[in-house]
Amino acid sequence: MQKHKTVVIGTGPSGLTAAIYLARANLNPIVIEGIQPGGQLTTTTEIENFPGFPEGIMGPELMDNMRKQAERFGAEFMNGWVDAVDFSQRPFKVTVEGSGTIEADSVIISTGASARYLGIPGEQDNIGRGVSTCATCDGFFFRGKKLIVVGGGDSAMEEASFLTRFATEVTVVNRREELRASKIMQDRARENEKVSWALNRKPLEVVAGDTGLKGLKVLNNETGQEELLEADGVFVAIGHTPNTTFLQGHLELDGHGYVIVKPGTTETNIPGVFACGDVQDTKYRQAITAAGSGCMAAMDCEKYLEGSIVHDWSESLDR
């Protein structure tokens, strides 16, 4: 059984940043990559809002650079899927499918959250080619275009309102006539003159041509007729699912499955187990915030392993 000071589970921006910091602290982390090494950014084309790249950078290239940086300082990578953990006592145990069990004095969870998709024809084929799950990431590329947002919750209303900064028109598509979004979010979207509505319509297919998206084929539930809603881009905003199935019963999770951390830290309810990135972030879900929390997790982990406590300077200042 392998024994390590620390194990990082997941290799998105948070996990790789944690690995860089841990490796530079001579903690020789082992990083378990999972089934999608690099995380969601490996399916993203051009990234223009990550600091340090004035001309932008491709998602896979950014993740590959971060991995190489972690390797340069001594991080070790293992490909595999974590199917079981045991946090009941130290050393903790992490079981990787096909590779056995690893023991570690500390663990950083950075498995991220997966965007939910519609599961309709043409959707997966056009991710990064007109289909997106992140308005903040990709809205800029659709300046002057017609867009569709699919969803009826707060996230969909927020995405639709945000996209009106760039698009000439944003059409909200929802399967039902009623929206799940809070009244304040609905009112905000309805008051926006650039937002139109295609309610009670079931998405059937993302339709693309030789030069880009044509639109979204839907079923009008009232008439029973199929319709093509023309658009240059389709934003799917039906929520995210945190990748925490293997943690159920082992860590404290919220009602949606996100890891609960102590405010202002990456500490979970188990001392020595930390969480960073989208797996504990229900609000921002950006590459840069994930990377920042990865830095936090590494530093929290290093302090934990040292057995030291950060001095509370506020007590000194009060005297």
Image (cartoon, helix red, strand yellow):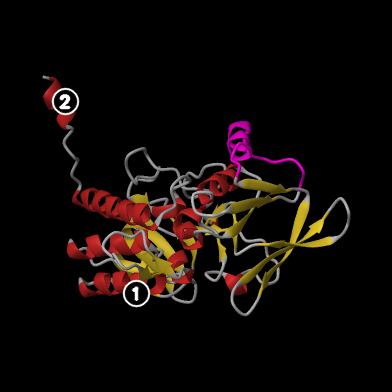
Residue, disc 2: 315
Looking at the picture, which amino acid does disc 2 mark?
Answer: Glu
Residue positioned most to the top: 319
* Residue 316 at x, y percent in the picture: 12, 26
Q: Is residue 129 magenta?
A: no
Residue, disc 1: 64
In this picture, is 263 found above or below 109? Answer: above
Q: Is residue 182 magenta?
A: yes
In front of the other: 129 or 7: 129
Looking at the picture, which amino acid does disc 1 mark?
Answer: Asp
Sequence order check, earlier mark of 1 and 2: 1
In front of the other: 44 or 142: 142
* Residue 207 at x, y percent in the picture: 69, 70
Q: Residue at x 41, y 54 (%)?
A: 286
Q: Secondary structure at mark 1?
A: helix
Quadrant (top left, top right, bottom left, bottom right) of the N terminus: bottom left
Q: Is residue 251 left or right of residue 152?
A: left
Which segment did they paint magenta?
A: 176-193
Inter-mark Cα distance, 1 to 2: 44 Å
* Residue 146 at x, y percent in the picture: 60, 58
In this picture, is 314 found above or below 273? Answer: above
